Structure formats: structure tokens, C-alpha cells
Image (cartoon, helix red, strand yellow):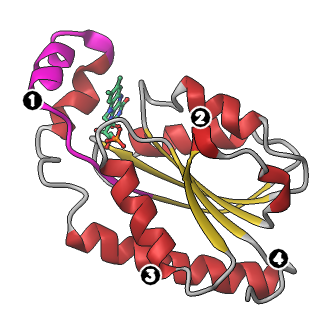
Amino acid sequence: MKILVAYYSETGNTRKVAEAIFAAVHRKNKKLLAIDQVDDIASYDLVFCGFPVHHHGVPHHVARFLQSIPQGKKLVLFATHGSLRGGEKALSAFYAAISMLPGRSVIGTFGCRGQVSFQLLDTWMETAQHRSWAKEAQSANGHPDSSDLEDAHAFTETMLYAAEQFHGLDRPS
Ligand SMILES: Cc1cc2nc3c(=O)[nH]c(=O)nc-3n(C[C@H](O)[C@H](O)[C@H](O)COP(=O)(O)O)c2cc1C
């Protein structure tokens, strides 16, 4: 089984989580790529795809990438966001991503916080649409931290187990 960890990251937060997930895949047949470097998506059996939450949803680049994934593919989604971990605001981005993936199986999702520059937060605090998450994001400084990355590691092991035990994927070499 071939595993891809694909990510989109503008300031490096999601890339850090992608690297932690990649390190946790203790298999030989694996690749870590930015989404714009992926050219043979059909050849992978399990795709981890990560993105930063933008405007409560999925950045356009990532939406296009998700829609290019062939039917039947098994996926794991991960995201970083300024808002609180596990909160409704962060979950809405996963719901948006899943709605773009009819016919593919999303076997799990992982979210953690990612810091946002204070300059951007100041701007968003002025906008009614963004004030709520921007307020929460003020305390995201320093994330993803080592504890987030450890959680990403443990999550990956769970996903690999689930892929092999419940989703019919062979133990990867
Ligand atoms: C244009 C833009 C929109 C954002 N919108 C949200 C949002 O709706 N909710 C949220 O929690 N964080 C939001 N964020 C914060 C990012 O999701 C967060 O900082 C993320 O960790 C950035 O990841 P990256 O460094 O991989 O790009 C936004 C950031 C940007 C730049």
C-alpha cells in the first residue's frame, strides 16, 4: 500500500503537522508533498490531506485538489486553525471538505491550532464575520506545539490501524 501525505501551508503551521504525520507513518512506501507537487494521486491507496482553515472552510487550492481525487479513494483530513481545538468553528471546515468528497471515504479527521500573526488578527477583529474566530485565535500563539505534534503522531497510528483493520487496505511495506 502506498501512502501520501499532501498539504497546503502558507505560514508553515500545517506543514509542521504534515511532517509529524509523515514521521509517524513507519512504512517504506510513503511520500510527503505539497499539494501542488502531487501528480499521480491515483497511484496512492491512502491519502492524508492537510490544510489551514480559511474563512471557516477550505482554501480554494485545496478544494480543487480534493475534487481531483479519484472516486473510491480513502482519505484522512487534517487541518490547523486559529480557533479553539475541537470547536464548532474548526469542525465546519471539515464538514465543508467532506461535502466536496462524494464517493471517497474519509476515515478520520485531525485538527489543531495554528498561530496567526497579530497583524492579521487585528484586521479580522474589525470584521463582524471574522471577529469570533479571531478572538479565539489570539491565544493560538506557539501552536502547533510539541503536544499538538505528539497528538498528530498518535492520531496517525490510529488511522493506519483503522485503514488496515476496517478499510481493507493491506499492511503497507
Ligand atoms: C486568509 C485566512 C483566513 C483564515 N480563516 C480562519 C478561520 O476562519 N478560522 C480559523 O480558526 N482560523 C483561520 N485562519 C487561521 C489559519 O487557519 C491558521 O493560522 C493556520 O494554522 C495557518 O496555517 P498555515 O501556516 O499552514 O498556512 C485564517 C488564516 C488566513 C491567512
Which image quarter: residue 102?
top right
The residue under the point 64% across, 31% down is: 63
Identify the residue under disc 1.
Answer: 118
Nearest to the eye among marks 4 and 2: give it. Answer: 2
Residue 57 falls inside the magenta stretch: no
Asked whether the beta carbons under mark 2 and mark 3 sit within 8 Å of each other, the answer is no
* Element type at mark 3: helix
Mark closer to the chain start, 1 or 2? 2
Mark closer to the chain start, 1 or 4? 1
The residue under the point 20% across, 36% down is: 116
Give the Cα separation between the discs numbered 3 and 1: 31 Å
The residue under the point 21% across, 29% down is: 134
Mark closer to the chain start, 4 or 2? 2
Identify the residue under disc 2.
Answer: 62
Q: Quadrant of ligand 1?
A: top left
Q: Looking at the image, which is closer to me, 161 or 23?
A: 23
Identify the residue under disc 3.
Answer: 154
Question: Which residue type carries mark 3?
Answer: Ala
Mark closer to the chain start, 3 or 4? 3
* Element type at mark 4: loop
Label 4 neighbourhood size at 10 Å, few (<14), some (14-19), many (20+)? few
* Element type at mark 2: helix
Question: Which residue type carries mark 2?
Answer: Val
Position above or below: 42 against 155: above
Identify the residue under disc 4.
Answer: 167
